Image: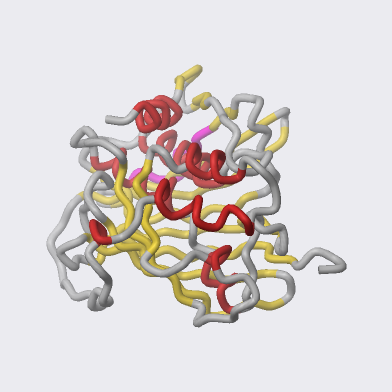
Amino acid sequence: MSQALEALLDLLDLEQIEQDIFRGQSRFAVVPRVFGGQVAAQALVAAGRTVPDDRFAHSLHAYFLRAGDAGAPIVYTVDRIRDGRSFTTRRVVAVQHGQPIFHLSASFQTYEEGMDHQADMPAAPDPETLPTAAELLPRYIDLYREQGVVERLLEARDAVDLRYVDAPPFASVGEEREPRSQVWFRTNGKLADDPLLHVCLATYVSDMTLLDSVLLAHGRGGWVTGDVVGASLDHAMWFHRPFRADEWLLYDQESPSASGGRGLGQARIYTQDGRLAVTVIQEGVVRIPRGS
């Protein structure tokens, strides 16, 4: 297991300070605020800590309310909304400096048999044939808006092996492309056999590239090149089938719409053997800076 993955697991291992109240630490991401995927994953950890072990996360719906301060801890308060015979619902509010920065509702279900069908997995190359982040990112160093971007990107993604199937948005600035993007990802090391942990790590990664397809449609490179400013607004995930975050997962993403300073991304996550594991939808602020 890489040191970066160990550090990420420590970040997700929340401190319980009272019944249904947890505290998580923060760290700087590639931008000067808390990474949204970190807050979402920590909130799901907090919710999961209050749920019986035989109930598994099947969905979450969240809103990003304020930018998080990476220099301060985050307090997560869990409300036990419902404990039914099959489903459990939790609401989590993340607070910093006395103000809510994030709100999450999550639902958990006991395992049961039922009807089963899924959308087919799209074609994608073998992830082992694709360049790693360390091999890919330095190729575009002349496009980055400032020095140190490569190092910050690599540090932020060192816990996860994330490989682009096609060139990322910042590699084709000025070229409008089909609003679709694919990446393969897995953690840089084996994980314990805890279903909640794998779901939380997938939640963490899901916020890294989902809005890339919005940028591709308009030939924008994003914050890396400085031609777009933005932030996540809301995030929803449905967990359909068991998966492991330490095994290759295909993140197939597209953008059906952008308007009013907002862009929508939707995606499906497949296991390498073709099982549909997760559906993800996110909307974010996507603004073009004045004068650019």
Eyeballing the image, is 142 above or below 260?
above
As drawn, the residue found furthest toward the top would be 17
Residue at image point 41% right, 32% down? 8
Residue 115, visible in the rendered structure: yes
8 to the left or right of 212: left
Figure quadrant of residue 41: top left
- Where in the figure is residue 186, as x and y percent of width and height? 30, 48
Residue 78 in magenta stretch: yes
Residue at image point 42% right, 63% down? 280
* Residue in front for this viewpoint, 166 or 218: 166
Residue at image point 58% right, 65% down? 283
- Where in the figure is residue 274, as x and y percent of width and height? 18, 68
Residue 26 in magenta stretch: no
Q: Over which residues does the magenta segment extend? A: 77-83
Placement of the C terminus among the 4 image quadrants = bottom right
- Where in the figure is residue 207, as x and y percent of width and height? 49, 53
* Residue in front for this viewpoint, 72 or 212: 212
Q: What main secondary structure does the magenta stretch of the protein show? A: strand
- Where in the figure is residue 273, as x and y percent of width and height? 15, 64
* Residue in front for this viewpoint, 19 or 83: 19
Figure quadrant of residue 226: bottom right
Residue at image point 33% right, 37% down? 51
Eyeballing the image, is 222 above or below 68?
below
Figure quadrant of residue 284: bottom right
Placement of the N terminus among the 4 image quadrants = top left
Colour scheme: secondary structure
